Image (cartoon, helix red, strand yellow):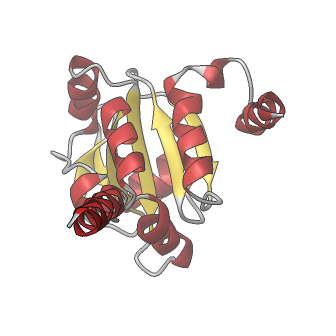
């Protein structure tokens, strides 16, 4: 009986551990629904005590965007950390949907991506301060969850003010040795 009880407890603990890391839909748990007015989104993010706004410029056919959504942005630890620190929105670089940019100008998503943010390849991960100024831009997919978490901490902790992301990662590697 004791063996059966111990086996049950071990099984229960292992199942609960697996569920904690179960991937979740990034459109439900990572990205937020936008009201379409990014000047207003900045104000809301500031009121909520966030560190800024993160935009994920994507293209539906982009394999690197799919990698990010299916491997990185679907992870609970990533979703929880980023939701705590940033307001996050997906921007379709071919989108014809009208939106209001950080300066209050109305335009199509594709114009916001191409003309204002110079997005040519996807994904582009861009962080903005509460004035709508882009403070960090990362082009392409990250190597995985670890690098994406480092990117978030780099911005949330204000390290971008003192160094480039590559130097920040190098310093993290040195500190672990």
Displayed quadrant of residue 74? bottom left
Q: Residue 176 placed where, x, y %?
A: 77, 33
Displayed quadrant of residue 91? bottom left
Residue most extreme to the bottom: 61
Describe residue 105's horizontal placement relative to residue 133 as left or right.
Answer: left
Which residue lies at the image location 42% right of the left edge and 48% below the top edge? 78
Judging depth in this view, the residue of 30 and 137 nearest the camera is: 30
**Quadrant where the image shows the C terminus:** top right
**Quadrant where the image shows the N terminus:** bottom left
Q: Residue 23 placed where, x, y %?
A: 34, 65
Describe residue 141's horizontal placement relative to residue 97 as left or right.
Answer: right
Judging depth in this view, the residue of 142 and 113 nearest the camera is: 142
Which residue lies at the image location 54% right of the left edge and 32% below the top edge? 153
Displayed quadrant of residue 60? bottom left
Residue most extreme to the front: 1
Describe residue 4's horizontal placement relative to residue 120 as left or right.
Answer: left
Compared to 129, does 33 lie above or below? below
Which residue lies at the image location 30% right of the left edge and 57% below the top edge? 13
Compared to 139, does 38 lie above or below? above
Which residue lies at the image location 21% right of the left edge and 59% below the top edge? 28
Judging depth in this view, the residue of 148 and 51 nearest the camera is: 148
Q: Residue 57 placed where, x, y %?
A: 45, 57
Q: Residue 88 placed where, x, y %?
A: 34, 44
Number of numbered discs visible in the structure rendering: 0
């Amino acid at each position: 009986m004791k063996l059966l009880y111990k086996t049950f407890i071990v099984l229960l603990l292992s199942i609960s551990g697996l569920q904690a890391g179960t991937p979740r839909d990034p459109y439900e748990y990572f990205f937020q629904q936008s009201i379409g007015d990014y000047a207003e989104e900045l104000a809301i993010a500031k009121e909520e005590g966030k560190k800024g706004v993160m935009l994920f410029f994507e293209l539906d056919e982009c394999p690197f965007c799919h990698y990010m959504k299916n491997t990185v942005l679907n992870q609970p630890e990533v979703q929880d950390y980023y939701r705590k620190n940033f307001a996050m929105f997906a921007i379709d670089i071919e989108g014809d949907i009208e939106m209001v940019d950080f300066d209050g100008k109305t335009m199509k998503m594709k114009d916001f991506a191409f003309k204002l943010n110079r997005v040519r390849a996807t994904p582009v991960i861009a962080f903005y301060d509460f004035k709508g100024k882009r403070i960090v831009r990362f082009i392409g997919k990250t190597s995985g969850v670890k690098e994406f978490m480092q990117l978030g901490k780099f911005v949330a902790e204000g390290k971008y003010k003192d160094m480039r992301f590559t130097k920040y990662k190098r310093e993290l590697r040195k500190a672990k040795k």
